[in-house]
Amino acid sequence: MGDYPKALSYYEKALAITQQSLPPNHPSLGSTYNNIGMAYKNMGDYPKALSSHEKALEIQQKSLPPNHPELGTSYDNIGMVYYSMDDYTKALSYFEKAHAIRQQSLPSNHPEVGVSYNSLGMVYDSMGHYPKALSYYEKALEIQRKSLPSNHPDFGASYNNLGMVYDSMGDYPEALSYYEKALTIKQQSLPSNHPSLGNTYNNLGMVYENMGNYSKAHSCYKCALEIVEQSLPTNPLKFQTFGENLERVKQKL
């Protein structure tokens, strides 16, 4: 998990083969460009990620009906890149386009509609609109409960997101409760070195630190750092941040 350069190499080979065998605007090419874009995003190369997702969207706009769910996926992917670049206004615009398409083309409790609610919640959270963020995250969770098995990784993401809003609002007990739920699900459904687990350990560490429980914060930061170390080549910034968190809390012990 998390070997993005290897994934990128695989997707680029797939693209070369597909380009030789299919017309230039075939929807399959759009899917491959989206995969390439996600690999670049995960590697932190946002300009290349944007370029790939925009190529995917361009192909899909020429080859699919205007409200096809795959267009929603591309809009969501572009929104995610802008979100990662902290351009929340553009991210929101693309997330809203994705959501509109999914609402038109999918059943109301389809997991992809839940993905849209999560994306909207994320951007409102980052913009400081916490009540709106909570509302969207709770809608996402409601859909997941109707459409997914109880230990699906998406629940981990939703609980983590809700925890982050309560964390931002300074409601640390509520944040802790959601982060612990997120951790339990991620431990059940993901490999032990998955980067997402590292993020949740780091979030737990921050809440414990804010609550003054420095020994638990230290333990969580240590777990987060050990996980991110295993995917270090692709995420040096996160490694540095988690390392700084661990060092800071050591001074408080």
Image (spheres, rainbow, N blue to C red):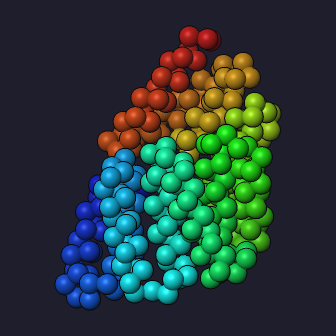
Looking at the image, residue 230 sits to the left or right of residue 215; the answer is left
Q: Quadrant of residue 11?
A: bottom left
In percent of width and height, residue 146 lies at 77, 71
Looking at the image, residue 174 sits to the left or right of residue 185; the answer is right
Looking at the image, residue 128 sits to the left or right of residue 86; the answer is right
Q: Residue at 51% across / 70% down in the picture?
A: 73
Query: For this rendering, which residue is in front, 43 or 86?
Result: 86
Q: Quadrant of the C terminus?
A: top right
Q: How many marks?
A: 0
Query: For this rendering, which residue is in front, 228 or 132?
Result: 132
In percent of width and height, residue 137 lies at 72, 55
Residue 41 visible in rendering: yes
In percent of width and height, residue 103 lies at 67, 76
Q: Residue at 38% across / 65% down in the picture?
A: 53
Q: Residue at 77% across / 54% down in the picture?
A: 135
Q: Quadrant of the N terminus?
A: bottom left
Residue 163 visible in rendering: no
Q: Residue at 60% across / 57% down in the picture?
A: 119
Position of residue 156 relative to residue 101, above or below, is above
Q: Quadrant of residue 34?
A: bottom left
